[in-house]
Image (spheres, rainbow, N blue to C red):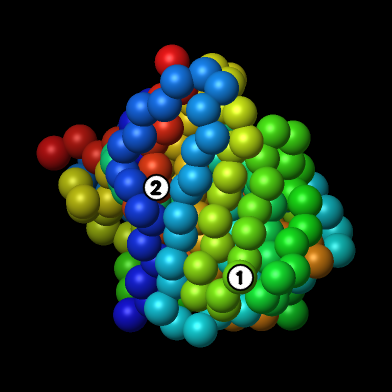
Amino acid sequence: GENVGLHLPTLSVQEGDNSIINCAYSNSASDYFIWYKQESGKGPQFIIDIRSNMDKRQGQRVTVLLNKTVKHLSLQIAATQPGDSAVYFCAENIFMKLVFGAGTILRVKS
Amino acid sequence: DVKVTQSSRYLVKRTGEKVFLECVQDMDHENMFWYRQDPGLGLRLIYFSYDVKMKEKGDIPEGYSVSREKKERFSLILESASTNQTSMYLCASSRQDNEQFFGPGTRLTVL
């Protein structure tokens, strides 16, 4: 949404490079994790998810890695494109509720 | 495709007015959610509902109420709008413990 990116960490990458966005989550009881993408003026869109019994999941151009030992989640985007520019949120599922991270701005330079 | 719609994209209200934000989903999802999104604070859960006529408080329910009379519709009510309720409001729905699908958001300004 508008101005959602104020004070957020920003990752700038060159078009065609790979992007890695990191997220630390808080609750060791979380069993399900999701990455969302939010473009300006729109609601968050689902990108990829992973359950706690997995440590890696791949989609089209995206990979999510889960490290439960250090409670860390990452989103890898291959061959980043200008259309990937957005704010990216991780979310952890705790008892049917999602708890969202603050978000990371991804800027793609052409 | 799941579709979550919200009644307004932009809304301007005056302090003290009663405000209704409507959300409709067309995928027969059990769960529905209302969030607000503010710069630097991410998405914060106001209320959620896991069934018709059921509601649960989220993290910031003060100043809000909700209504779920039908499975597909979840309404957020601001009984007496205040300026600190100026925000982006996002509705979402999901099936059980699965990903939430979001609507486009309503940008509410309270003057």
Which corner quadrant of the image does residue B96 belong to?
bottom right
Real-space CA distance between mark 1 and mark 2, rounded to the nearest whole angstrom: 21 Å
Taking depth in this image into account, of A102 and A65 the one nearest to the observer is: A102
* Relative depth, front residue between A87 and A10: A87
Image quarter (top left, top right, bottom left or bottom right) of the C terminus of chain A: top left
Residue ID at (56%, 27%) = B81
Kindly state the secondary structure of the residue where label 2 is placed.
loop
Q: Is residue A16 above or below residue B36?
A: below
The residue drawn where x is 56% and y is 75% is B70
Residue, disc 2 = B105
Tell me the residue that label 1 is attached to: B69
Q: Is residue A93 visible?
A: no
Q: Is residue B107 visible?
A: yes
> In the shown orientation, is residue B39 left or right of residue B84?
left
The quarter of the picture where the N terminus of chain A appears is top left
x, y percent for residue A52: 73, 73
Check disc 1 and report its element: helix, strand or loop.
strand
Q: Are marks 1 and 2 on the same chain?
A: yes
The type of residue carrying mark 1 is Glu
Q: Amino acid at mark 2?
A: Gly
The subunit carrying tag 2 is B
Q: Is residue A64 left or right of residue A4?
A: right
* Residue A46 position within the rendered picture, expressed as x and y whole percent measured from the top left: 44, 64
Residue B77 position within the rendered picture, expressed as x and y whole percent measured from the top left: 58, 45
What residue is drawn where x is 50% and y is 38%? Answer: B19
Placement of A42 over or under B109, stated as above or below:
below
Circle 1 chain = B
